[in-house]
Image (cartoon, rainbow, N blue to C red):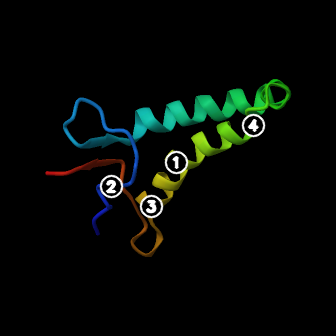
Amino acid sequence: YMLNSHDHVHVSAGDHVKFNFPMAFTSWSLNWGFLRFRDAYESAGITNMMCDMLKTPLDYFQKCWIPENNTLYTQVSKT
């Protein structure tokens, strides 16, 4: 199984490697802040922006899970 290399997820250093653990922590941190301070996001009018920002990595993580094989890809490289 090969993930699409154009999943619109940031890759660092131009080496075409997607490091899922740092991305998972960052996504979790953003989501925690959003859930904890949701009223502030709503009063600033950026709730939809935050939801869009969180959707991209979560969609990517969903593609990394292959339930038929009980497999979770945790690092993806173009090599």
Q: Which numbered disc, 1 or 4, marks the residue that appears first in the sequence? A: 4
| Amino acid under disc 3 | Lys
Quarter of the image for the N terminus: give it: bottom left
Q: Which residue is mark 2?
A: 6
Rounded to the nearest angstrom, the CA distance separating label 3 from label 1 is: 11 Å
Task: Judge left or right: residue 31 versus residue 71.
Answer: right
Question: Which residue is disc 4 drawn over?
Answer: 47
Q: Residues within 10 Å of mark 2 (few under 14, many from 20)?
A: few
| Mark 1, residue position | 56
Secondary structure type for disc 3? helix
- Amino acid type, label 4: Thr
Q: Residue at x 66, y 37 (%)?
A: 50
User: Above or below — where is 55 with respect to 14?
Assistant: below
Q: Position of residue 30 (x, y in %)?
A: 61, 30
Q: Nearer the viewer, mark 3 or mark 4?
A: 4
- Cα distance between the residues tagged 1 and 2: 12 Å
Q: Is residue 47 left or right of residue 59?
A: right
Q: Secondary structure at mark 1?
A: helix
Disc 3 target residue: 63
Q: Earlier in the sequence, mark 3 or mark 2?
A: 2
